[in-house]
Amino acid sequence: MLGRAYSLLGFKIVDGVVGAGFPQKPSHSAVFAQIRPEGSRLTDLARGAGMTPQAMGELVDELEAMDYVVRRQDPTDRRAKLIVLTEKGRACVAAGVSTIRGLEERVTEKLGARGHQQLRTLLNKLLDDR
């Protein structure tokens, strides 16, 4: 049941973002969900998403080719690169946040405010086990 809910929500988020004019694949969410506003190192993105750096690197390459991210030198370590959102990437993330807010509103409509809060509490308990 959790797998079905995860897939359904993931596709609804991607559909909302694509519908807002930001084409992408569902797998790109692994980058957008992890990247920090000031930028992130590839290894941190991979660790946060539970992926290998090689797999994350492929996603970052795709997003760089689509002008959602750029690689910049890390000011704290000249040997490292930061993955940073471009203006287009920030707009894409904003579209994702807006889509998620809309989905949360639909959950509240279906479950009521109390049911929605209970669901959030239970999901947070599951996420605390990471």
Image (cartoon, helix red, strand yellow):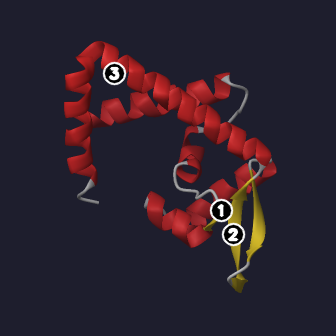
Q: CA distance from mark 2 to mark 3?
A: 36 Å
Q: CA distance from mark 2 to mark 1?
A: 9 Å
Tag 2 near tag 3, CB within 8 Å: no
Determine whether the residue tagged by mark 3 lies in a helix, strand or loop.
helix
Q: Nearer the viewer, residue 124 or 13?
A: 124
- Is residue 34 at all visible to an observer of this figure? yes
Closer mark to the observer between disc 2 and disc 1: 1
Q: Nearer the viewer, residue 36 or 55?
A: 36
Q: CA distance from mark 1 to mark 3?
A: 31 Å
On the rendered image, what quadrant is the C terminus found in?
A: bottom left
**How far from the left and from the top, in percent, is residue 128?**
25, 56
Q: Is disc 3 surrounded by few (<14), some (14 to 19) or many (20+) residues within 10 Å?
A: some
Q: Earlier in the sequence, mark 2 or mark 3?
A: 2
Residue at screen point 58% across, 59% down = 36
Quadrant position of residue 71: bottom right
Determine whether the residue tagged by mark 2 lies in a helix, strand or loop.
strand
Tag 2 near tag 1, CB within 8 Å: yes
- Residue located beneath label 2 in the image: 82
Farthest front residue in view: 113
Which amino acid, by three-letter code, is at mark 3?
Val
Q: Which mark is residue 107?
A: 3
Q: Nearer the viewer, residue 62 or 75?
A: 75
On the rendered image, what quadrant is the N terminus found in?
A: top left
**How far from the left and from the top, in percent, is residue 37?**
63, 56
Which amino acid, by three-letter code, is at mark 1?
Glu
Q: Which mark is residue 38?
A: 1
Determine whether the residue tagged by mark 1 lies in a helix, strand or loop.
loop
- Is residue 66 at all visible to an observer of this figure? no
Closer mark to the observer between disc 1 and disc 3: 1
